[in-house]
Amino acid sequence: MRVALFVTCVNDAVYPSTGIATVRLLERLGVEVDFPEAQTCCGQPQFNTGYRRETERLVRRTAAAFEGYDYVVTPSGSCAAMVRQHYPKIGDASAAALATRTYELTEFLVDVLEVTDVGAYFPHTVTYHPSCHGLRLLGLGDRPRRLLEAVEGLELRELPGADECCGFGGTFALKNSDVSTAMGQDKVSHAVSTGAEVLCGADNSCLMHIGGVLRREEAPLRALHLADILASTREEPLV
Amino acid sequence: MSGTFVGMPSFPRAAKEAVHNKTLRGNLRHATHTIRDKRAKAVAELADWAELREAGKQIKDHTLRHLDRYLLQLEERVTAAGGTVHWAADADEANRIVADLVKATGESEVVKVKSMATQEIGLNEALEAEGIAAYETDLAELIVQLGDDRPSHILVPAIHRNRAEIRDIFRTKMADWGRAAPDGLTDIPADLAEAARLHLREKFLRAKVGVSGANFMVAETGTLVVFESEGNGRMCLTLPETLISVVGIEKVVPSWRDLEVFLQTLPRSSTAERMNPYTSTWTGTADGDGPKTFHLVLLDNGRTGTLADEVGRQALRCIRCSACLNVCPVYERAGGHAYGSVYPGPIGAILSPQLRGTQSEIDASLPYASSLCGACYEVCPVAIDIPEVLVHLRERVAGQGGKGHRLEKAAMKAAGWVLDHPGVLGAGERAASKTRRLHPSKLPGAGAWTRSRELPEMPAEPFRDWWKKNRKPKPDGTSKPDGKKS
């Protein structure tokens, strides 16, 4: 089984800890992971902002970078959805083939490795925000929740209005800053109302926005990617 | 309705005000969440919802593919049943046709059934300019008209108003338009409804001309169909001597069998009702029953152009249920007026720029008025992939290179080049990490982000550097152990 990590550009540049956590988690589960260094960005920001030609170049690059791997795993529902939903329409046969081999991290764990208890330890209260693309485009369903519930010491708290968008939306966060912020603030107040210490998500771009609001408002909880929690163990706990 | 959408600012500017209006936010949140939850329950009752949704989509797509044929069939059947069919290429032509028809009756007032098509073309204003008074008879449209306001929702045009505001509008404005509000009117819903009933009844009984739209037109029999909940539509469709219906050409369906699908999906999607309260159907005219004269004005007004766009044409499937508005997080916070059109919310964001073009500031900004969260597509009873059309329209707007898009395009090109060169990307990431202590907390030009959000702290090194140091296989095939530099 040849497995490649598709770390995503946001994780590569801003949240390397999530990429590292994904590698450690998969290795702990006996998966040998490779990181093809030719990968950069899936092209979603360009595509969703209306720049098709710029997208096409990145689709070609991404498809070529992951040629030959059986599974391409990414800790981002949004980037996985870009590849799965749009690559067949934008790119050639190799882009379409990549779409069939691309898995969001929780899908790979639950569906391919058939594991929900990954041996993680995280003694904190956590509430989970299912990002829109994972929720609606990929249909991740209860996979993230099942993984979190199996984490030793973790107490999961229900997030009110969980399926409502946090307001990130890529360039939407900049072009419609006021509405985006209002959505983010509502998400944060819902998260605060749970009393949890951690707001967990499976998309760091959404968490960058929610976390940015959290910190500006000095809310009493922090945003963390699911992979960071699942990588945490008794031996090497995430603090 | 004398409020107008002409010269609207771009969506972000219009939304900014609404976002900070606490009363409006509260009204919208309460109303949209109530309808949203009810709809979810009503839809969940049907085991074959997915099949009904697919059937609705296919019926609409089939009809749109053969629109010419079905419209000609409809014209023939309506004419055979005693009606007269008029074809209007745009709003001006439709307004002129209706004004001339009303004048020919010698009347100077009309009663109206709630109709999106007549709002789209600004019929009330056009009639007013010709000395003809048009009275809205739907409760919410009455509130909007009396308040000299604009509709902010397709189905619930006064959704931005609460009970107390409605009471005040009735108390101060009803007398100007006819029967005044009863003394001591309260904001109890039943009292407000009674005030509207008394006010409207004299208009129903006096009116000689009725104006409507239609939810559907059945080609095989030439029958028009109106769905409504209050009974005011039934009054307007049966009491006047002359009935004029203005209907978009995309509202035709081939047969009654096709209509049956929408009889199930429209009420549940819009008002969360299992069965629609008042469904009126009429075919031409009938002796001694209902209007003696019937005119159908078929409206294009940008629909043919929309039909020519392979991606965008799915917007013409819309049956105006408003389910997409009620689940939209952007609509909930920006309010309907920010969309600068009688069609607000997600469907408005793809319909207005297609019907009106993307040249004006507001129309060029509408395709971006979405976080692409996909909640709209999920609830749409005719499966319009609204996010897909939004992105498609963004391509059109970005391509025309208007305000702000030239710089954006250059930035996208530059980013595209960097992202196509992983070495350059890595160098950039490294530079950003190395200088992270020097980054000001508020970067110039990043104001749209930092006004309300902190920027993330940059890491010590990008992931690709960690990989090289800790995992990348050495030439002899072995990997370096985690975290230990050999």
Image (spheres, rainbow, N blue to C red):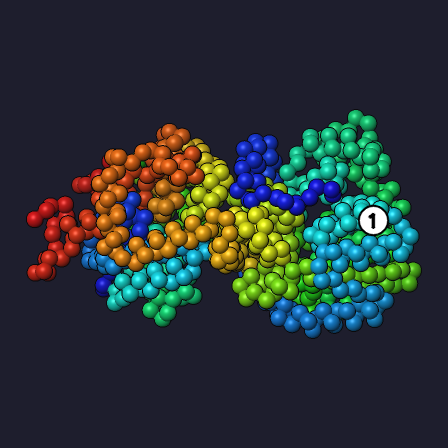
The N terminus of chain A, quarter of image: bottom left
Quarter of the rendering containing residue B446: top left
**Whole-percent x and y of residue B63?**
64, 69
In which quadrant of the rendered view does residue B7 lie? top right
The answer to whether residue B259 is left or right of residue A10 is right
Q: Residue at the location (35% across, 53% down)?
A: B414
User: Which residue is depicted at the point 56% across and 35% down?
Assistant: B17
Quick one: label 1, few (<14), some, or many (20+) residues within 10 Å? some
Q: Which residue is mark 1?
A: B130
Toward the viewer: A193 or B9? Answer: B9
In the picture, measured across the screen, residue B20 lies left or right of residue B228, that is left
Q: Position of residue B210 (x, y in %)?
A: 83, 52
Vertical order, B114 against B284 (above or below): above
Q: Secondary structure at mark 1?
A: loop
Residue B368 visible in the shown view = yes
Image height check: is B250 above or below B269? below
Residue A131, image x, y percentages: 41, 47
Q: Is residue A119 visible?
A: no
Q: Residue at x 65, y 40 (%)?
A: B159
**Residue type marked 1:** Glu
Work out which residue is located at the far top of the displayed protein and give it.
B184
Above or below — where is B58 with respect to A182? below
Label 1 chain ID: B
Question: Which quarter of the figure is the C terminus of chain A placed in?
Answer: top left
A204 relative position to B372: left or right: left
Residue under the point 39% across and 44% down: A206
Residue B330 appears at what percent x and percent y?
A: 53, 44
